[in-house]
Image (cartoon, rainbow, N blue to C red):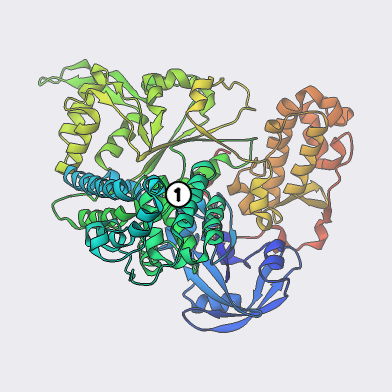
Amino acid sequence: MRKYIRKIFKHDITHEISITTKIVKDFFNSEKSFIVKGLNSEDEGEVVINSATDPRFGGDIKRIIRSEGGIDIDDLIIFHESGSNRYELEIVKKTNDNYHVLSNLFKKNKRHIVFEADEQHFHDDYLEYIAKYLKSKLDMFSDVEKNNYENIVQKHEDLRKRFLDKFSIENLKNMDSETKNKKLFTTGAINDSLLYNLASNEFKNLGSIGQSTSTPIDYRVDLFVNDLEKIATFIEEEYNFSYETFSKLINLIKSLNEDYLVRLWFFKYLYINFPHVFVSQYDSNTKKVLLNKLHLLESNDDFINMYNLSKIATISNIPTYMFEFVLNSAERLNNNAVYDETMIKEIITKPHQRIFFGAPGTGKSYNLSIEAQKYFGDNYERVTMHPNYTYGNFVGSFKPFPKAKENGEEYITYKYVPGPLMKMFLKVMLNPDKNYLLIIEEINRANVSAIFGDFFQLLDRKDGISEYPIVASEDVKLFLRERLSRAECSSEVKNRIQSMLGIDYERIVLPSNLYIWATMNSADQGVMPMDTAFKRRWDFEYIGINDAYNNNIYDFDNYKFKISNNQIVKWNDFRVAINNILSSVNVPEDKLIGPYFISKSILDRKDIDELTDNVKNKVLMYLYEDAGKANRSKIFDIDKAHTFSELCKSFSENGNSIFKNDLEIESFEIRDFNDEQLYPFDENIPVDVEKENFSY
């Protein structure tokens, strides 16, 4: 059964909810209307596809959503196929147990997912999120819990080895036919057979098969061993932990003997031999129960469930038989009143060091801010770098500090003043249950290698923790000792700090709950180069020149300005036309104009006069003095561009006439619009520009 999941953006709440032509075709079978029923309210109605522009849900969709409890930003709506031209609608709120799992299926700024309910294996990002969640639980165990965990794993491995000493595939292969007939499928303790041992209490801790072994086995023993060898060869030579090769493996087993697929003892034997491929949960219900505890959608296909659990075990390096132990121990930790803090933080499936880059106006800072609020709430700080920024500004340094004697006389002493990185470092160490983000704007406008100094070494991380600690300088050591030793926190937190930094705070390590994200614009004048070693420690995320427009088409189509006294044009049409001109004279992409080259706060006010002034004073200045400076004669009508003031004057009279060739964009007569359309007032748009004017 297919499902369509739609993530809700701000615009969807106040306007019609958009979809894509591909979704209409592939999921809704190109139908212009269909019946939808609320999963909880059972409110039913007809939903139509409005397609005057791009496809949007119309008809009774908003009423049904209200009956289901309404929607907020980032909520999910799910359409479940329930019959011919019929669907059930479910709303998953951010407070739902399975929200974080489902929401992490979405890549950045994506809204749509369609998948078969029996094909959750397609979502390896989904499985990785669950694996990291499990791993974080294990990483936060106390020493006692870790010892318990390690002891159970060791006992399990010892038991598995003891079984294999008797019945490994190699041992079976070396038996003669008479011994095989006796040692494989006979029942009863007297023969100590393979089948008997798989079901015996001695090896029950390797997974209970819950299946009688008295069912007659009529396999030919030599053929059975040959089949096992073929399976072993496939796993050794072809299996690569992907669903594709797992499916091939199951199909191979089916081709060898279809009866193998219904024998739980057979899969227990495979697990004992290949624990990195198969799982210790053998019957389908046990797998589904475990998947539900992991907030993972179970499939009707038992082998898909097997793959999902195996994949999580591979990524997390936690065996499947320890999943429940980790979850239950973490729950005990959360409920233990002795601890002041849970030590368990939400997993963020994003890189710890990340740089957004792209042309000016593509929305780098805006996208970063949206993600910061989504993943960190209020737990983030922002700093902007510039050519005079130093290590002392960023990390910290001793600075003169005035002090007064008892008689009132002032004197100068020196005090260590922490920079934004050191302040954030204190927060993450004292609050291991929370994630924190340090945002660095314009990271390449300063000498970042000098600014990070020895902290540069800490950017090499494994599982989010610095792989190579650095020695704390004396000033940093004194500062940390003063702040951390006196901090009010639980003994658990203090023990964690000392285990990471040393008893005397003699080393520094970045913990996994500290994230550093940045923006850079290689097109700006005065930027400083980054060396390769520094770049290697960051994940770079390119923001395409049209990404912001493609994700907010409806909004951008409503941003208009005056191209002449009696005509208006869409800001995005104008921007694209300018970029085409720049590209035609070989201006590189990182100097093209992004959709948010004019700030979002100005665009959202939809004040035509204000937007016109910004195009004239900001966009034309950029073209004239920067991006198009070397090609003015190829871009502008040179008779109207001798000076910038002359260019602005000509633009006010007729913006299209200032270019060497007319812009091929659609224009609208101003007289066709009333004042309300030209100057709409939106009470949701803030008037305070300073609060909303991000650097793009």
Residue 492, percent from left and from top:
17, 43
Whether residue 140 is situated above or below residue 28 in the rendered picture: above
Q: Quadrant where the N terminus lies?
A: bottom right
Residue placed at 28% from the left, 53% from the top? 326
Residue placed at 32% from the left, 29% from the top? 422
Q: Viewed as shown, does residue 277 lie left or right of 527?
A: left
From the image, tell me which residue sits under label 1.
128
| 625 and 255: which is toward the camera | 255
Q: Quadrant of residue 459?
A: top left
Whether residue 480 is situated above or below residue 272 in the rendered picture: above
Residue 225, percent from left and from top:
45, 53
| 399 and 518: which is toward the camera | 518
Residue 311, percent from left and from top:
44, 51
Sort mark 1 into few (<14), some (14-19) or many (20+) by Cα contacts within 10 Å: some
Residue 232, percent from left and from top:
47, 47
Residue 542: tell me if it is visible: yes
Q: Quadrant where the C terminus lies?
A: top right
Residue type pointed to by label 1: Glu
| 36 and 630: which is toward the camera | 36
Q: Secondary structure at mark 1?
A: helix
Which residue lies most toward the left here?
406
Q: Viewed as shown, does residue 467 lie left or right of 259?
A: left
Whether residue 171 is situated above or below residue 451 in the rendered picture: below
Q: How many marks?
A: 1
Q: Quadrant of residue 280?
A: bottom left
Residue 96: tell me if it is visible: no
| 238 and 378: which is toward the camera | 238
Residue placed at 30% from the left, 38% from the top? 428
